[in-house]
Image (cartoon, rainbow, N blue to C red):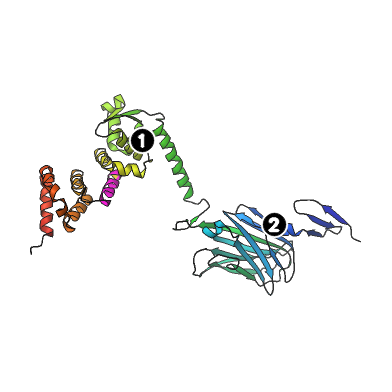
Amino acid sequence: MSRFQIRISPSFQLSTDNGRTIKSEMADSKVDTISRLAQWRIENFGSFSYKKSDPFKVGIWNWHLSIEKNRYLYIRLFPEPSRASKEQPPIARFVLRVSNAGANNRRPYISPGMLPSFSLSILFFSLSYYMFDSCDTELFHAAVHERSLRTSEDFVWPVDSSFHGRLIIDVEFLDLKVCPLNGGEASSIWPGDGMMPSVSTQGTLRCLSRMLDEAIHADVTIHTADGTLSAHKAILSASSPVFKSMFDQGLKEKESSTIDIEDMTLESCMTLLSYLYGTIKQEDFWKHRVSLLGAANKYDIAALKDACEESLLEDINTMNVLERMQEAWLYQLNKLKKGCLAYLFDFGKIYDVRDEISKFFRHADKELMVEMFEEVLTVWKPV
């Protein structure tokens, strides 16, 4: 009679005196994971058997492996049904390997795959993987597949092999992507080449925001029409050649560490600083864009000037077209000027502002009036 030695461990085992080990079914279903690798060890897999692994987590999803032996050995990889896998199914790129555990001439079969969850089309392209076996000098080949992944039937790998007994199945995830809930291009859930610059930028902007909001080591005071603000010479100088000149050339701003911007309110000047520090909010930009345009022109901040012009061009209407025309002329914004002229003459909106046009002409620059008259001649077609 054989003697049994019982060892209590996380994987419950019964060991005979000749070294034979029988693992529990619970241990046989466990998948171990490290980093992006998942490994399923099956102690005893016979003919005409079926096993399904316990769930294992990689990325934001829980996964299952299953193995079935009939004529072929069928291996499946699929996400566990859940809200996450339903709303944001994984787009997985991985390599799947299966081999006999403990064999001296262990020869893994390899099946790489790329599984998008949303594409109904099936694409095939010839990317090959090979495995060299040191004992039998045999090559194994598999191709990359791309297909929809919804259920356990969406990826089934038939292995034409006599694998049995102790098996090891490895899944190495090369990438996992997910589509945004509101649609759009899929992106990797793992940091990549573009992730660190993004994280770094966000951290820098948080620091700059604190510098502005808390006046950390501020070294210049700005006097506006209705209050004062604190800022940093280095930030202003890097953003504007005009500010840089103030601090470099011994002007009064350098000596007194003050700048007078009395043609802006405290609120609009704070919005200007928010732009220079990279923390501006869209609603603040929209509210103060006319004042920002004047400041951008005055302090030679080209990118801000362009942004203001594009924004003012987006919402021309009969209530503001003449004012926009004047701003376009004043700040030499050709794109905005052409947009206003097209709105007035090409689209016939000049008739909707005839009550305001007389006042506009009394204050408009003569060259602007000439240009508007030339536009009238261009679009006017005698009956």
Q: Nearer the viewer, residue 67 or 254?
A: 67
| Left or right: 208 as drawn, with respect to 85 | left
> Regarding mark 1 in the picture, which secondary structure is present there?
helix
Is 88 inside the magenta-drawn segment?
no
**Viewer-side label of 1, 2:** 2
The main secondary structure of the magenta stretch is helix
Q: Is residue 218 above or below residue 1?
A: above
Residue type at mark 1 is Ile
Quadrant into which the N terminus falls: bottom right
Q: Residue furthest top?
A: 256
Q: Is residue 365 above or below residue 178?
A: above
Asked which quadrant contains residue 298, the reply is top left
Q: Which mark is residue 30?
A: 2
Residue type at mark 2 is Lys
Q: Residue at x 13, y 55 (%)?
A: 375
Residue 337 in percent (x, y) is at 20, 50
Q: Nearer the viewer, residue 354 or 19?
A: 354
Q: Nearer the viewer, residue 217 or 342?
A: 342
Dot 1 or dot 2: first in sequence order is 2
Q: Residue at x 29, y 41 (%)?
A: 288
> Regarding mark 2 in the picture, which secondary structure is present there?
loop
Quadrant into which the C terminus falls: bottom left
Q: Residue furthest left?
A: 383
Q: Residue furthest right?
A: 1
* One can see residue 24 in this view: yes
User: Where does the magenta region start and end?
Assistant: 303-317
Residue 98 in percent (x, y) is at 66, 64
Q: CA distance from mark 1 to mark 2?
A: 57 Å
| Left or right: 220 as drawn, with respect to 17 | left
| Left or right: 238 as drawn, with respect to 57 | left
Q: Which residue is mark 1?
A: 235
